Amino acid sequence: MKALLRGGLLAVVCGLLMLLVAGPAAAHARLESSDPPDGASLSTPPSTVSLTFNEQMQDGFATVTVIGPDGAPWHDGETQVDGNTVRIAVKPLGPAGVYQIGYRVISDDGHPITGSVSFTLTQPGPGTTTSAPAPTSAPATTAVPPAAAPPTEDGGTPVWPFIVAAVVAVAIGAAFALRSRRS
Amino acid sequence: MPTASPADGARRAGSGRLVVVVSTPVVVAFAASVLAGALAATTVPVLAGTTATRAAMDVAGIACVGAGLVAALVPLGAPGRSYAAERAAVAVHHRIDRVLVVAAAAWLVAVVLGTAFRTADAFGRSPAELTGAELLAWTTRLGAGRGMVLTLGCAAVVLGCALARLRDPALVQVRIPLVAALLGVLTPAVTGHAGSAPSHEIAVVSVALHAGGAALWAGGLVGLLALVAPHRELLAAALPPFSTLAGVCLAAVAASGVVNALVRVDSWAALVTTGYGWLLLTKVAALAAIGVFGALARARLRAGRTPVLRWAGYEVGLMAVAIGLAAALTQSG
């Protein structure tokens, strides 16, 4: 019993030590602020939008989109990550109305966090998109979080064959160890 | 190995029940995740993958903890033991080592698959399209990923120790795989939700207590039922210390669960308005019922009445449900 308790205690202590190594930020990412702020009315269109979270963002995991009142994407280029902030450039905006900034980022605990904020452009800008506008009388109020992160690697080979091979190797190894002992 | 045929029959019935116990958390975890609305940010196959592998990880890890704990509760060469009981203890230890090999191998597989599914979830694509670079980024740059790597290491240590013990039990003390298994069970808990920013240290300590206590308790109970129950003399010697340990674990699990809930849930209303809150309430109910069954089993044990095992069996069933719910909680928004 005493040895058992000592073992358990040791495990807890090791776990806590491990925590110090793993770093303190093990929480869900939350959106703290945005530029432009949620619900803002702007007369001049922004050239970039940025979102600031409560924890360090990871490059390559974050996606931001800007969807206009016409349902067309107005963001431009790649999502940039800088500390707790992710930002993306915006094309010269076109029609007046509500623009949705959708985001999809990864918490340090590995969970994807999606959401959106919006701003209203009061004066039409000079920009046009190539896609045919689909005019709707009511502005889009539903959140349009980006579905997926952009592909990070061009020449990346799928990793699943290696995973399958590892799983099969472990299974065969364990079966072999048990079988050889039984005889 | 000289085993009587009734024991063989009982063992076969027992292994059927064990399959049910082992698969329950996986099913419960997926159903609860869907009900709690975890599909908002994830597709169905990926959600099935993340919750099922998480539940499988927990089950395999707890099986390793339980097997190691049983080995510690039934030490070889205990004083005052009959010759038959000592021989039974040797057989139990041999089976423990075999169980450890199977459970640790399953744990390794579950961790590898879980890492793949959670990376796929993070990048928002199907696991078939994942690249090695993405897997590397997820496992090295995120706390959750580093936690999975640590768990992988712990499972590998347990597997290595079990393989060495199969060859010669004197090579490795059974305490080593027990500690490694506990560490591996704690890791995904502390690198998971573990507390929103403000009181995160408290959340991390209490979630470690929660996972460790639950693993020792559930694993030990299942291990005793599956491995030691047929040998009355060994069981009689192992149950009193386990019963004490289970009481301590119940207290630790309940207290740390409350602390975690206070840290995670913003208001009383959130208990009934959010999916997370509902899962939490279900877990509280499960814990209360498990405690009642455990107390009944203990009272019967004290009174020397036999159907201790049936109550303990109900307790195990409820634990399987609670563990599944826990897995759903870890993967919920």
Image (cartoon, coloured by chain):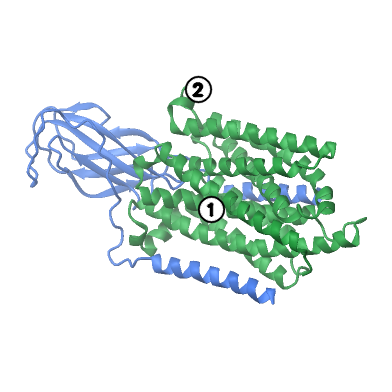
Chain colours: A blue, B green
Q: Can residue A166 be seen by looking at this rendering?
A: yes
Q: Is residue B141 above or below residue A51?
A: below
- In space, the residues marked 2 and 1 are separated at their CA atoms by 32 Å
Of marks 2 and 1, the one in the foreground: 1
Residue at screen point 19% across, 32% down: A140
Up-down relation of residue A103 to residue B72 (above or below): above
Q: Residue at x 61, y 63 (%)?
A: B102
Whether residue B173 can be seen here: no
List x then y, in percent, for residue B332. 45, 40
- Label 1 packing within 10 angstroms: few (<14), some (14-19), many (20+): many
Q: Position of residue B219 (x, y in %)?
A: 66, 49
SS category of the residue bearing label 1: helix
Which quadrant of the view contains residue B155?
A: bottom right
Q: Is residue B1 left or right of residue A132?
A: right
Graded by Cα atoms within 10 Å as few (under 14), some (14 to 19) or many (20 or more), the crowding at tag 2 reads few
Place of residue B227 in the rendered image (x, y in percent of width and height, measured from the top left): 72, 56
In the figure, residue B132 lies in which quadrant? Answer: bottom left
Residue B130 placement (x, y as % from top left): 36, 60
**Are labels 2 and 1 on one chain?**
yes
The circle on residue B56 is 1
Given the current orientation, which residue lies at the most extreme right position?
Answer: B80
Residue denoted by label 2? B268
What amino acid type should be assigned to the residue bearing mark 1? Ala
Q: Chain letter of disc 1?
A: B
Which of disc 1 and disc 2 is earlier in sequence?
Answer: 1
Q: Amino acid at mark 2?
A: Trp
The secondary structure type at the circle numbered 2 is loop
